[in-house]
Amino acid sequence: QQQQPPRGSAAGRETGLFGVPELSCPEGFQEAQDKALQQSEQLVQKACSTPPGPETVMIFDQLSDALCRVADLADFVKIAHPDFAFREAAEEACRNIGTVVEKLNTDVELCQSLRRLLADEVVMSSLDPETRRVAELFMFDFEISGIHLDEEKRKKAVNLNVRILDLCNEFLTGAHLPNKIDKNVLPEHIRYNFTAEGNYLQVAGLHADCPDDLVREAAYKIFLYPNAEQLSRLEELLASRNSLAQLVGYDTFAHRALQGTMAATPGIRHVWKDILRNQMHCVRTRKDFEMMTKMKMKLNPQNSKLMPWDHPYYSGVLRAERYNIDPGLYCPFFSLGACMEGLNSLFSQLLGISLYAEQTQRGEVWSEDVRKLAVVHETEGLLGYIYCDFFQRPDKPHQDCHFTVRGGRLRENGEYQLPVVVLMLSLPHSTRGAPTLLSPGMMENLFHEMGHAMHSMLGRTRYQHVTGTRCPTDFAEVPSILMEYFANDYRVVNQFARHYKTGQPLPKNMVSRLCESKKVCAAADMQLQVFYAALDQIYHGKHPLKKSTTEILKETQEKFYGLPYVPNTAWQLRFSHLVGYGAKYYSYLMSRAVASMVWKQCFAQDPFDRAMGERYRREMLAHGGGKEPILMVQGMLQKSPSVEDFVDALVSDLDQDFETFIMDS
């Protein structure tokens, strides 16, 4: 990170969170919310009285911006702010704005103003493709909220949306709650692995990395023991989603969720099923499970049957035994400063972009270790800001994620509203003797999240409704997964990985070992992803479901995964992705396939190729969600990928690099 003189910011001056003056205290959320609602009322009136034309779309986008600027910011604050009062105020703001959005999505008069525009062929044909697409996306929001229904059904749609929101929050909370068990049920020698609470032991996770088979088995069976309340929440959530989808004219919730995505393209929809038909993948998956079984037999001859609680552990053992990739060997080469320099250098060579550390004002950040980066292009100047909330702290969620706090858009006065995002990681603090050191996994996650941030910075759309990562889910992960390929390339890593004490570069064979170790059991890992994607599609498919969610889990696990279902467990009740990725879990596989194709075709030969970097920006990043994702992929690859291309891209990533394997053996 380069240091740059702060742009006229006086560190002594008071402000609110993210420089929003009202947010210097929790009560400010009410003020910000009232202001946004007042603005939105004026914009609704303006939209209803404006004749059809490009201005209609602009007013709709201003309306979306006014509400999102409070809702998006509150979405982040409600989970990450250390002060409970701020979190509570943000939660309340999210709820209130969410309710207003649902009401607006069923406002008939507001919808009519957009309908008049879409029905006017002369005006529509004069609009540029991005404006047309944004108009259609706003109409889609109306339609999925049931605008075309009579008043009674519209009310029902609003109520279903509100109920679904509540069920999602309740299900998420339930998915993370620990289970308790009488401590006498467990053998004495393993009790210390769990938190004691009187006569009970609390099991808060799967203990997937524990070397003791019995501990993993106990954790699996106790943590995944079915909870009746959580079960009924899931059933009601799936049924409500289905009712809403059918009410507004879709066969199933999955049909509704896939509108506008890459998977809506005929033939590509079931890419996860096509993986299973791939001979090479099937052979490798079988081989992976055989290797894990042999390893279990070697370490635990009395009980050598491979079970679901064994997969993460034994694949890790195989990796470590074959490639010796102890994170302790790698961490000294990945100080946070070195990794940030690596990102800066990569972005500079590929895209002409530099990251500068900026001073913040008092009250602008929620924790003193949050850093603000200005993203500056060599000719275009300042593109936006990234707030880096990188370090662990009490009550901070242990998840790595990217939040849009303010979307980019072209303002009415011709100026560009700069995007603002937060990257949240859970890195250890530096110590007196050493800087913050990242494990290889943490380094890859940093690159992944930075991929999202660059999408936000470079998705310079005219409308904030489609800014940056506001695009279909199965495309949103492409830029972030692509960054993982850069993070695993020796030519890139060699530019920044230096031992923090000696300055020695990370040896090439260590990078090769790390990359090859990721391919150990990768087919079995992909099989697990296919199982999750299939389960998600079935749950959101035709209703009423033919069987209970647990029976469907058992059937799907045995058909798509290969390891047996364990009686009296209900893994689906811990499947928190059903909330944010309902009917879209397949997106991970789809995005990985696209990222793999882009890497191999465009960057594998030269990861610093500026012409390719510019093509990547022009064809994929610049449009945000303002262009159909499959068209962006075609523009980048300069061809239309078939379903075979998608499958091959995923399966070819599993190939062992024979040369490295021999060298390490």
Image (cartoon, rainbow, N blue to C red):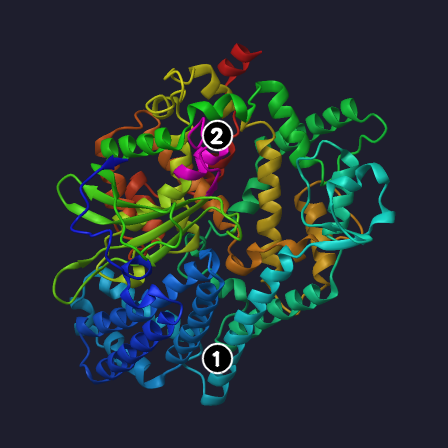
Identity, as a three-letter code, of the amino acid under mark 1: Val
Q: Tell me, yes or no, if residue 265 can be seen here.
A: no
Measured as percent of width and height from the top left, residue 197 is found at 76, 53
Q: Tell me, yes or no, if residue 621 can be seen here.
A: yes
Q: On the picture, is 600 further left or further right than 399?
A: left
User: Which span is picked out in magenta?
Assistant: 426-447
State the mark number for residue 158.
Answer: 1
Residue at 47% in and 50% down? 267
State the mark number for residue 410.
Answer: none
Query: Which quarter of the figure has residue 116?
Result: bottom left
Numbered disc 1: secondary structure: helix
Seen from this angle, which residue lies furthest front? 12
Measured as percent of width and height from the top left, residue 425 is found at 45, 44
Within 10 angstroms of label 2, few (less than 14), some, or many (20 or more) residues?
many
Query: Which quarter of the figure has residue 373?
Result: top left
Seen from this angle, which residue lies furthest bottom? 151
Within 10 angstroms of label 1, few (less than 14), some, or many (20 or more) residues?
some
Report the mark closest to the observer, 2 or 1.
2
Residue at the disc numbered 2: 440
Return the residue nearer the eye: 77 or 553: 77
Asked if marks 2 and 1 touch (Cβ < 8 Å), the reply is no
Whether residue 435 appears in magenta in the rendering, the answer is: yes
The answer to whether 600 is drawn above or below residue 469 in the figure is above
* Quarter of the image where the C terminus is located: top right
User: Which label's residue is closer to the chain start, 2 or 1?
Assistant: 1
